[in-house]
Image (spheres, grey):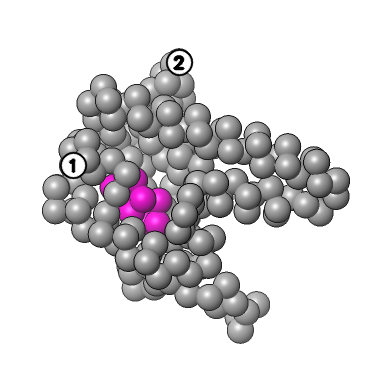
Amino acid sequence: MVDICFGNTLIRRILKLQRECDYNNGQEIPFHFNYGILKGDPIDTQARIYAEALRCYYPDTDEVEQVYCDTKKRYDNAIEWLNSVLRDKKTIRLWISNTANDICNLCWLCHYTQKYDPVILLVKCPVCEKDGQSNTPDLRKSWEQVSSDDTFLSAIDSAAAMTKNEILFYAMQWKRLVKENMPLRVLIDNSIISTTDDFFDPII
């Protein structure tokens, strides 16, 4: 079994809690498919977006291109690792937050892995977690907001395998998002909506 999540600090915490020394047992999938166009090569697009976002720190075009190359290599390594997991028929335990990025990445993952007929266990972020000091419940949207180690460990026991219909549903959602090919995707009422990149301007 391998652990997959969509944040680097999160995967390190998960593996540390499980006292795993071999980081091949877990991996961050570093994409942010909640923004950027999806047609063509979306992973290359992701690397380009990341490099361009750092242009203010690297005014030299050659430096920006190097950032792109380094980022693309990191992304390609993540895909290569995922391919090896799928070829070896390993069970995937996926830590998922209730955010647009994680749901978009879930759609991509289901589409990408569907032909391998994978076993995917979903570990969903709890909606509420009791505050350690006040003992009152606080809302949580992402695993990064969860403070208690016990919450992480107990969540493993509640992980549920995705059905083939669920994997198919999210894979079809990915196809829809690619067809719409908008620059931004947001989570509204538990649904991913494609929209323009000025969607949040009225509330900024």
Rendered position, 103 above or below 17 = below
Label 2 sits on residue = 21
| x, y percent for residue 159 | 23, 41
Task: Check residue 164 for magenta coloring.
Answer: no
Q: Residue reaching furthest right? A: 60
Q: Nearer the viewer, residue 157 or 37?
A: 37
Q: What is the crowding at mark 2: few (fewer than 14 residues within 10 Å), some, or many (at least 20)?
A: few
Q: Is residue 88 left or right of residue 187?
A: left
Label 1 sits on residue = 161
| x, y percent for residue 123 | 30, 43
Alpha-carbon distance for marks 2 and 1? 25 Å
Rendered position, 106 above or below 177 = above
Q: Are marks 2 and 1 in contact (CB under 8 Å)?
A: no
Residue 173 seen: yes
| x, y percent for residue 144 | 49, 47
Q: Residue reaching furthest top? A: 21
Label 1 sits on what residue type? Ala
Q: Which residue appears at 40% of the width and 56% of the height?
A: 104
**Which quadrant would the N terminus be assigned to in this image?**
top left
**Element type at mark 1:** strand
Q: Earlier in the sequence, mark 2 or mark 1?
A: 2
Q: Which residue appears at 37% of the width and 31% of the height?
A: 82
Rendered position, 176 above or below 134 = below
**Which quadrant would the C terminus be assigned to in this image?**
bottom right
Q: Which residue appears at 33% of the width and 54% of the height?
A: 107
| x, y percent for residue 154 | 29, 37
Segment tinted magenta in the rendering: 103-110
Q: Nearer the viewer, residue 168 or 145?
A: 168
Q: Nearer the viewer, residue 28 or 51?
A: 51
